[in-house]
Amino acid sequence: MLRKIFIAIGVLLAAFAIFVGFALYHYPKARIVSASQQTAPDFTLRDANGKDFTLSSLHGHKVVLYFYRGYW
């Protein structure tokens, strides 16, 4: 009988610890602010084939800019 009580107390303590862990965890806020609906400055870069690409060549079209920082 006493063993069942200790097991029940242990289960309750574990459940409480898990609940407190989830209750206190806060997701971090995004560090990057969206620039949605803002005009991007014009720039020129080389594409995968080595040709120059200028952002202004897409003027009048909707464009999504995604900059990927590689790990190399």
Image: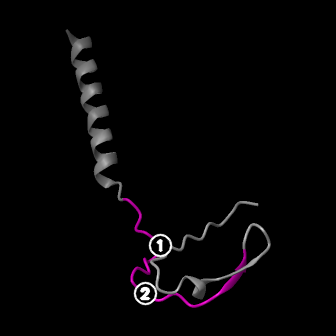
Closest to the observer: 4 or 35?
35
Q: Is residue 51 above or below residue 3?
A: below
Which residue position holds label 2?
38
Quadrant the C terminus occupies: bottom right
Q: Residue at x 26, y 20 (%)?
A: 6
> How crowded is the residue under tag 2: few (<14 C-alpha within 10 Å), some, or many (20+)?
few
> How crowded is the residue under tag 1: few (<14 C-alpha within 10 Å), some, or many (20+)?
few
Residue 3 — which label?
A: none
Q: Is residue 29 above or below residue 22?
A: below
Residue 36 lies within the magenta run? yes
User: For residue 57, which quarter of the picture?
Assistant: bottom right
Return the residue found at the far right. 50
Which residue position holds label 1?
31
Is residue 50 found left or right of 66 in the rendered image? right
Is residue 62 found left or right of 48 in the rendered image? left
Is residue 38 found left or right of 67 in the rendered image? left
Question: Mark 2: which amino acid?
Answer: Gln
Return the residue found at the far top. 1
First to last magenta residue range: 27-46
Closest to the observer: 1 or 16?
16
Question: Mark 1: which amino acid?
Answer: Arg
Please, what is the dominant secondary structure of the magenta stretch?
loop
How many angstroms separate mark 1 from mark 2 (CA)? 18 Å
Q: Secondary structure at mark 2?
A: loop
